[in-house]
Amino acid sequence: MAKEILSGNEAIARGAYEAGIAFASAYPGTPSTEILENISRYKEIYSEWSPNEKVAYEVAFGASLAGGRALAAMKHVGVNVAADPLMTSVYTGINAGMVLISADDPGMHSSQNEQDNRRFAYFAKMPCIEPSDSQEAKDFLKLAFEISEQFDTPVMLRVTTRVCHSKSVVELGERRESAYREYKKDFVKYCMLPSSARVRRVELEKRLSKLREYSNKSPLNRIELSNTEIGIITSGISYQHSKEAFPDASILKIGMSNPLPDELIREFAKKVKKLYVVEELEPYMEEQIRMMGIEVTGKEVIPGIGELTPDIVRNAILGKKVTYEIPKIPMRPPILCPGCPHRGFFTITSKLGLTVLGDIGCYTLGAYEPLSAIETCLCMGASVSQAVGFAKAYKGSKKNRIVAAIGDSTFIHSGITPLIDAVYNKANVVVCILDNETTAMTGHQEHPGTGRTLMGEDAPKLDLEALCKAIGVPHVRVANPNNLKETEKVLKEELAFDGPSVIIFRSPCVVRDRSVWKKPLIVINEKCAACGACFRIGCPAITKDKSGKAVVDPILCIGCGVCIQVCKSSGADKCKNVSIGYCSDICSQICRASALVEKEDL
Ligand SMILES: Cc1ncc(C[n+]2csc(CCOP(=O)(O)OP(=O)(O)O)c2C)c(N)n1
């Protein structure tokens, strides 16, 4: 069989293909995003970006009921959004195999929190499978579908950033078309009213004990017996770290972490002198093992925050005190790209001193200095609902100045219902939809507002203006955030309005749409007053020379012109007085600009 070097996410996609699945859905989110991007390359599988994770889970569940194997993929916090259907789908069980992929992010490389979704699987009483490399990611996914069908339950495949993004050798297999399972109407199984749910509740417990028996015998859990001085129970990426730190130790490798293989754990515990549990984040296995009456060392020595490494595992077990520390290296927070349309918007909200309640997306970077323009970030969609509550309860001087800033993808994900709340309850808020026509933060995925699907087809484009009007928003405006005067005028007008309004700040993401790139700008050194105004917009293309004057890097600058508009020496629109202007000399000297050598007089 052919072998390839694949990331965990690519391997999961391959596993989905080989498992003969019919349907895959997701809402993007690091570290899970590439799973669906890779699945969409297999034309045998219908795949879609759903508007949010709840929908992604439900459409996959619908596909499973209809008889096709289905999966839904999401980052760990996405499972919170999908929790409602998830908790009850475990009662009904499935028809064709159904797998939920939860991609957790220990260390919060790209997340607003750090949660261990093995706890979710335990809470939901669903099987949880944990691969530790790309080969297992593929093989375990296939097995997860078999477990799902054998035990009539959705199954969680829980991966973490290191498994998702590390690459290792994977032996490929053939696609085995899964047999179509005919849907049969079954009130007690599929229609969760109290009378039927009570029946299924009992079934759920019976299923769990069968799953525990399975877990004890399953090849997913295996003892690797070696030196018996130290025994380590571990799962996922922590298995790789443990092997590297203690190549000679005995290991119980857990691949199925819910339900845990209790008998196997007892057997292993008897064989070794000192027993450790090495697991990232929560003492999930440790607590259960202790509840079995087995003496074990875990979080007393292994940090419960952040990622583990072989060094941490080695030091912790050798008795050196290891505690989690926030990295001390100089912070280099991510910043808005040069030319990002969000910059113009924040330049004005900062200037006006507005209270901007933020959301999650590239625009959250407006919270960092020097813009410091966003005051909150909680979860997707929360900007609008928080703004409603804030506007209602706030008694300070900025009472009428509450602004919610939310991206287009995030608005569709979970901003619409809170906007309905704003209209229904007459909240005095200005909701600013920062519409860059893509899901930029996670890598430019399509969404219902882009007019394209994951599978590359044209789709009806969600009309945000019409949607907001239909909700009943009295004022719906559209503005160009790169035009600072227009941005300021529209914001001031809507802030003066007593009631909810929506301003759609529309300008494409410049990383995705290069058609908006203009010639790079140049600073006329002798005209620069070194006032620093252009530094305050936080554009990475602008740096300071030794004398404190501005310098524009022509390689980074895409000529959005926001800096020209804040340049103090610009003297309105009179080009002659502008100290930053379009460069024609430099353009002709750099390759990217060779297409842009139009003469432009300063
Ligand atoms: C529940 C949840 N799902 C997914 C994510 C990952 N995520 C963060 S921001 C974002 C979307 C950003 O797109 P948009 O709102 O259009 O803003 P942009 O980045 O384009 O400015 C996604 C998918 C998340 N943080 N939380």
Image (cartoon, helix red, strand yellow):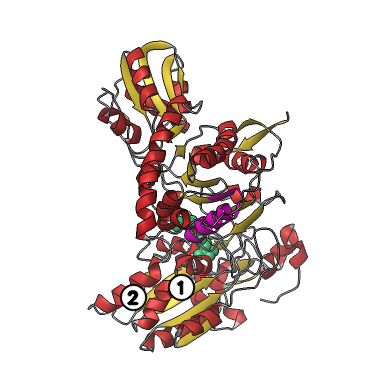
Q: Is residue 557 above or below residue 79?
A: below
Describe the element under mark 1 as helix, strand or loop: helix
Q: Which label sits on residue 388?
A: 2
Q: Main secondary structure of the magenta part?
A: helix
Q: Is residue 571 visible?
A: no
Q: Is residue 243 visible?
A: yes
The single residue placed furthest to the left in the displayed view is: 395
Name the one closer to the observer, 518 or 182. Answer: 182
Name the one closer to the observer, 497 or 353. Answer: 497
Asked if the residue at label 2 sits under 8 Å from ligand 1, the reply is no
Question: What's under tag 2, amino acid-wise?
Answer: Val
The residue under the point 55% across, 69% down is 341
The residue under the point 43% across, 62% down is 380
Magenta segment boundaries in residue numbering? 54-72
Image-based side of 214 in relation to 439, left or right: left
Question: What's under tag 1, amino acid-wise?
Answer: Ile
Q: Is residue 43 above or below residue 420?
A: above
The total of numbered circles placed on residues is 2
